Image (cartoon, coloured by chain):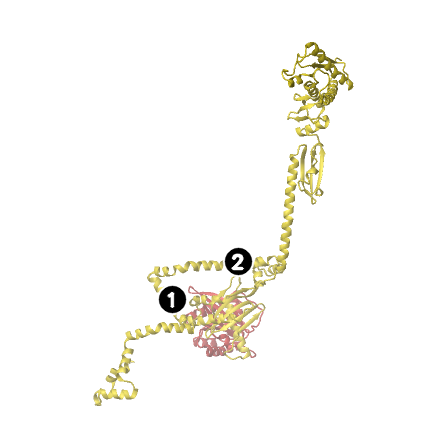
Amino acid sequence: MNEYSRDQISKESPNNHNGGISNDDLNELRSLLFGVEPQKLNKIYERLDNPDINAEDISRLLPEAVVRSSMEDKLLGEAMVPAVEEAIQTSVKQDMNVLSEAIFPILAPAIRKAVSTALEAAIQSLNQTLEHSLSPQSFKWRLEAVQTGKSFAEVALLRSLVYRIEQIFLIHRETGLVMQHLVGAMVTAQDPALVSAMLTAIQDFVKDSFNVASDETLETLHFGELTIWIEQGPKAVLAGVIRGNAPQELRSVFQDALEKIHLKFIREIHAFSGDTEPFAASKSYLEPCLQTRYQEQEKKNYAYFWVALGIAGIAFGIWSFFTIRDRMLWRAYVEQLNHQPGIVVINSGRRDGKYFISGMRDPLATDPTTLLKPGHVNPKAVKSNWKSYLSFEPELTVKRAEQLLQPPTTVTLKVDDKGILYATGSAPQKWISEARKLARFIPGVTQFNDENLFNSELQALESYKQQIEAENIFFREGSTELVSGEEAKLQNLVKTLEKLFSSAKSLQKNVMLQIAGHTDNDGTEQINMPLSQARAQAILNYINSQGIQTANFRTIGVGTNKPLRLGSTSEEKKMNRRVSFKVFLTDSKK
Amino acid sequence: MLQKKICMVGAFATGKTSLVARFVTSIFSEQYQTTVGVKIDKKTVNIEGKELNLILWDLHGEDEFQKLRMSYLRGSSGYLLVVDGTRHNTFDKALELQARVENTLGKIPFILVMNKFDLTEEWEIDVNDINQIKAKGWIVINTSAKSGMGVEEVFQTIAKKMLEG
């Protein structure tokens, strides 16, 4: 522009000094020719010539220009990559800490994400292997693995693939030489240089053989499970080896990668003479092409399965509950039996759907079957086998003694650990005698102790004696006639006498009854003595009349000598008009 | 890694495939199998301490029924013109092919390989012819794929030439 600037035009004009044309004339001519005011034109020149003003203008327009360019396409971003990379390199060389501090916050999350992605891939691979490891199909795959020499995991992964881009070739279009080559995980790759060359040869062969137009290219090759997609660029070719059926949309990923590589490496591609080193950085552009997709597991409707499983679960729960409860009840029952005296459980358990129990049992011990129902154990589900034995446990020995001795209810039997049988309470003499004889024959009894066992008949005899001696029969004043109501007492007295005689007889004792007559203190002794005698006799007569042997009975009249009361009042005198009794018991001579 | 494409060019049955087989796998077979289309092999050589991958395009031999496909030659860094020394017509064919190749690829390194040198009693190529060729600045090397004579030298020489550019 400088050469066209106003000043220069003025200087360079051949007519400037020789033609006689003034600057004004020239300016006028310029305004006529360009239609622009000279001053404005001068300003424009000034702006163009001044680098500071240019920079200022560009700085105003640059942000908007960058935004617009980014919205339209990615070319600006791609174009800036070398500059940015260089800037970063320069920054690192100058001061590494600046960049380190800047990227530090994103570095750790990025590492975590990378580790997480790697783990996910590993888990997915493991899942695929495990999911198919036990299916019927897996046997077929195992056979295939054996036949092909591949691992089962590899075959399982291949068969569950929708597609996988196994290899990516970046090929120099003119020479057919490989510039970059990427291989997927677990993929066995041939020499990329040979494959690349062969692909180029095939391409050339097809073109030559079928007379196709020069811009037409071979885009797809199929070999069994493998498909090769070929994307042609102006200077480079991108070929992807695909196993399975890849979606056509993936071609756009290939194309995108190829476009970026052309943009980024166009100088290197032009200058390519077989050296692959400059294309090392193209790896990052090609990696997105190495895609893999596995079959998604069908989401089957498992409602019936879950219902069935739920029912089975509930049934199992109920069954478990009852089974556990039964077993607990059974254990409690066995435990209870073990604690029963006279029962020894030797073996117990469950066999053929039934409980069994065997052991030894004293016949006098509790019947085990009687404990089944209280223990909530089904008797039909139990098979018992008991062998009899004699238990020397005190409880059983007592039972055995009771069975043999048949003690009266007034007798309590007890056996201590030493086998001493204690009999306490009262019993007839006869039973006591029998017990003393039999006790020694009772299994488990070593000794019989009846120190605290009393003769019940003797006690009864004593009781009758006391009853009789406590009795007084009252008479009318100066008479042998009984006071009204005394007859009943006499009848009871007769009954008591009968019991006394009966007891005395069993105890081999003789009974002698003394009937003593009494009077009040009224009257003289001459009158009272015979009266008292007569009263005793009257009672004796009555007793005799009731059928009681009175041979050993004796009557005496004591008059006023043994009064019951003082006799100062009529009431006391009434109490003294009586007959009293005294019983004498003596052992009968054999 | 540096890699270069080399094409084996020549009339049919001159021993192109045998030369490649001898060079790559050190094997020679008396059985003749004609090459259909192209066969590609690779061999890594060390040229003055520099590893170089030679991608060898063994092209089918040209005869009256089958013309050489020039498209296969595209991008070659060098080529070997293989002549069967026992058949003079293969020499003529080599000269003809060289002209065509140069017309297609321009001036790139090449070597005239006089193969089957083990069959000297049947040799048909006159020394004068060879001298005339050499006078043109061509490199001529006698080889025998059967004995291995000159094979390594041929590939080493072409590799060096290619690296020299």
Give the residue pinned by disc 2: A123
Q: Position of residue A81 (x, y in %)?
A: 39, 68
Q: Nearer the viewer, residue B56 or B88?
A: B56
Subunit ID for the residue under disc 1: A
Vertically, is A333 above or below A393? below
Vertically, is A357 above or below B154? above
Q: Choose mark 1 or mark 2, whichever is in front.
A: 2
The alpha-carbon separation of the residues under discs 1 and 2 comes to 36 Å
Q: Which chain is yellow?
A: A
Residues at marks 1 and 2 touching, judged by CB atoms closer than 8 Å:
no
Give the residue pinned by disc 1: A85
For the question of whether residue A279 can be seen, the reply is yes
Quarter occupied by residue A458: top right
Q: Nearer the viewer, residue B99 or A286?
A: A286
**Direction from residue A126 to residue A550 in the image, left or right:** right
Q: Which chain is red?
A: B
> Local crowd at mark 1 within 10 Å, few (<14), some, or many (≥20)?
few
Badge 2 marks a residue whose secondary structure is: helix
Badge 1 marks a residue whose secondary structure is: helix
Please name the amino acid that badge 2 sits on: Ile
**Direction from residue A217 to residue A377 in the image, left or right:** right
Same-chain status of marks 1 and 2: yes
> Local crowd at mark 2 within 10 Å, few (<14), some, or many (≥20)?
few
